[in-house]
Image: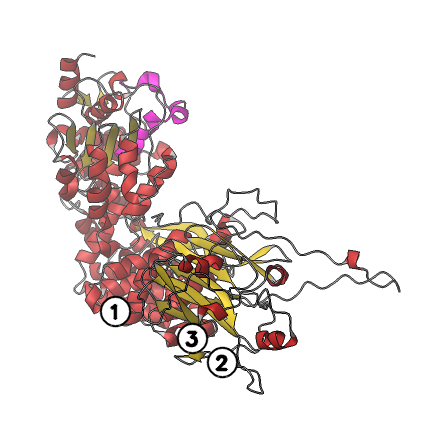
Amino acid sequence: MGDEEFMNASDDASDEEHGGAVGYAPHPHIGGRTAVLRALAAWRMQWPGAPRVVVLTGSPGSGRSRLVTGFLMLCDPEYRKQLPLDDLDPTIVPPDLPAPAVPDPRGLTADQFLWTIADHYGLGAARTSDIVPELAAAADPVTIVVPDVDRAGPVRATEEPARLVRDVLKPLAAAGTVQLLADVPRELTAEVIESLPAGQGQVIDLDEPRWADPAGLVLQVETSLDPRLGAPALPYTEDPGARRALAEAVAERADGSRLTAQLAVQCILMRPEGFDPADTSGLPTNVGEVLDWHAQRLGADPQTLRLMLAAPALAEGEGLPIELWGPLANAVAGRDMSREIADGMLLAGPFVQPVEVQAPTQASVQTPVQGSPTEQAGEEATGSRTLLRLVHPAVADAVRAGLADVRGAQTRIAMALLEAVPQQDWSRADPYVRDHLAAHTLAAGLLPQLLTDPALFAHADPVTLRAAVEAVPYDTLGAPARTYLRTAPLLTRSQAPVAMRAALLETAFVEDGLGPYADALHALDLDLPWRTLWSMSLPGVTGVTVGSLPQAPADGAAAAPGRTGGGQESDASSGAASNSDAGSSGASAAASAALPVAVVLVPEGTPGSRAVPSGSAGTGDGAGTDNGAEAINGARAGGTAVLIHQLLGPGTVDADPALILRPSEDARAAAPLALSRGADYLRVWDRQRRTVVAALISDTPFTGADLSPEGVLVVATARGVKALRIPLPEPVPLPEPPGDTAATDASVPAPASIPAPASAPAPAAPSDPDHPADTPAGPHGREGDRS
């Protein structure tokens, strides 16, 4: 096919008859659209003169999704084997090439969608902004097909399709190595190709006469009326001439809308009584008219039908649980709709479809570091449930357009969902209520009032809740919501289960001075892996270690160092070792009464800090763990100072750094917990059981981390330092000695050796418990934020 022949074939649809080119069978899934398929086939094979970027658009219900699906059948090597390729017009059949990438944007944010592409091509990008440049730099061109852009986003009101076009499709189109086909709403099409050189981009609008293919629509309607293909046997379906005449009438009235024609046929066949095929003047011309026409044919009030469909039309996610249909219909209508719902399937049938999905429940897994992927995601399958959704988004648009007060309806739905939470216990709430209440409240304009319950923050799906909260003006959010908003990237990045989400939020609330909210999370039945003891905002922290300061014994023989800020004192620091040159009983007594402290390496001049004189002693006898044990020595090197903070409570300590005692290596080795870490995550291990008891992630790299023998974890980033108490595990019971034979030392299992490296180690085999594989949990999380 030469360039001129290609252009003529693409531009001229006049040779189409009955939905296909003369002498060839129509596409079995599409039943026409030959001109569009020719253009797409030329795009796929990169024919000279064909554009590199094609944007497919049209009005809702014009058949974009069906067309893309049918074209992809021709592009998939396996599916091609099921098609009668020899019977099809060869100009619509692309060559047998590898299948293009088809990332699905439905329900995803723009960032999630980008990481889907990155995962498909195995890119090594570390940040979202690196993905398209890395793809553009690839040696070989890549072909990407993006369907259903209008269905992007976890929350409908957040306008994620526009963000997807701006942040993903436009950069992809500009990348010279990317061959792109995207199904985009008409109002967003220009932005995709507006910056491309002439000839590189093309918009195919299915409503334009050159692409509309009315003959193909007639063929689709005629096929759906054929009793041989499932339609009921009626006089006007069994007779080919009558069937053809009715198909032409339906298609003409639908004015190119595949959806309007499809719904009209379903309404006719669902209630054939009283329909006169000779009187086609009342056939509907748009989706809204189909709703009214069907209700009137059944003798029902069209507004009743719209009220029945209002809850599914306003539903979020994959659909509305069928159990909630009645209560939410009552809420929207302001009256009892149970009878209409019970008797109304004939009325609502053409417009709704039930969908069986797996029913998730929130798992009790505490840390997303071990176990199956479903455990890491915080969900486990518990059978299936039935969701109800409308057959097409355009039906939902028509229903919403017929509601007098959409915001009021959303308010009543939100209140009904809130009342459906058993005793306001979010752990027992229906997954739809838990995950989508925020979206309905956002649409009602009431979301800031909802964002005060830390239990909701922990239990709700972080992707949907984050999307809803980000859509609210920041200055209208209260303090708890702002804390959630800054923590949400960690929750979405890690796919954290409920208990882990609650733990990360607990720490964030303490950091922001919202102690009662942190306490409320501990009141939930979640068994959090830690309690945050204190947090201190400090710029420039470069290291941290744990230690202790000698305190005055009961007889007052020794002087205690000065303290500020108050706080708790340790009962007995059994794991802390005495100074390397301390061996007397007096030194031992001082050590037993020592004050546990955290030593923080800070820039010189930090309020409350002290410079460490060169050559000072008293830093204990152990080298400590992975990074912070050299904090005092690092400060002694110059340019930094140390700040001493009580370990078990708030308040800094004004004391001579030379007096600080650090835990000995023996004390650390005997401790029941061990620490390992990477750049922005760390794990605390049960040394005997060789299992993870706590995992902490950070949105900025850790600059220091240390774990006291008593289970207090101190972590630092460049922004500050905080302390978390990790509950000590129960000791592993010793095996019973056989008979009367006394247990020997050999019968006592040695504790596992859990290394605590200074930096992230190379991943080890997961089967080696003595050398845990310290890699982040999950590939990238649902949000895919790896920055």
| Nearer-the-camera pick, 684 or 281 | 684
| Kind of element beneath mark 1 | helix
Crowding at dot 3, Cα within 10 Å, few <14 / some 14-19 / many 20+, comes out as some
The three-letter amino acid code for the residue at tag 1 is Pro
Q: Position of residue 749 (x, y in %)?
A: 72, 56
**Proximity of marks 1 and 3: CB atoms separated by less than 8 Å:** no
For label 3, the SS is helix
Would you name the residue on which mark 2 appears?
560
Bounds of the magenta segment? 66-89
> Who's the residue at 40% across and 49% down the image?
781
Which of discs 2 and 3 lies nearer the camera? The answer is: 2
Give the residue number, with chain letter if any, for mark 1: 448
- Identify the residue shown where x is 52% and y is 43%: 763
Residue 577 shown in magenta: no
Q: Tag 2, which secondary structure?
A: loop
Where residue 641 appears, as percent x and y from the top left, is 37, 63
Q: Nearer the viewer, residue 537 or 16?
A: 537
Q: Mark 1 and mark 2 in contact (Cβ < 8 Å)?
A: no
Q: CA distance from mark 2 to mark 3?
A: 33 Å
